[in-house]
Image (tube, rainbow, N blue to C red):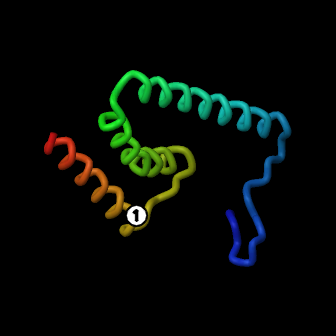
Amino acid sequence: MGVGIGGGYSGVQFLDLHMFILVICSSSTLLLVTKVLYQQAISSSPLSLTVPYLALTPAFLVGTAFVLVGEQPTTIGLTGVVSELVELKQSMLRR
């Protein structure tokens, strides 16, 4: 599943049109909500306080990928996420 080296795509096949539409609509709605909340956070707080939280994105992705599709991160991937979280914690303590 995913993009092959030759550029071909062998992604998930939806057998049910209704399921495909449900996935597209729910994904689009979730994306819209996150964009609106992000814009509100930027407009109500200084950038120096809001942008560092973007470093949490990989941690959320690892967690949701495991829950939703059973994907397990590699050791290198987990090391990267942990190092980002440590750096974020250290930068918050420096303030």
Q: Is residue 84 left or right of residue 20?
A: left
Q: Which residue is mark 1?
A: 77
Residue at 74% x, 32% y is 22
Q: Residue furthest left?
A: 94
The image position of residue 36, as x and y in percent, is: 55, 26
Residue 74 as seen in the image, left or right of residue 86: right
Please tell me which residue lies in front, 32 or 39: 39
Q: Amino acid at mark 1?
A: Gly
Location of residue 13 in the rendering, given as x and y in whole percent from the top left corner: 79, 53
- 43 or 8: which is nearer to us? 43
Q: Secondary structure at mark 1?
A: helix
Which of the two residues, 76 or 36, is positioned nearer the viewer here?
36
Viewport quadrant of the C terminus:
top left
Note whether 9 is above or below 28 in the view shown.
below
Count of number-bearing discs: 1
Question: Which residue is pictured at 53% across the width and 31% down the height?
Answer: 34
Vertical relation: 92 (above or below) 35:
below
User: Residue at horizontal 73%, vertical 59%?
Assistant: 11
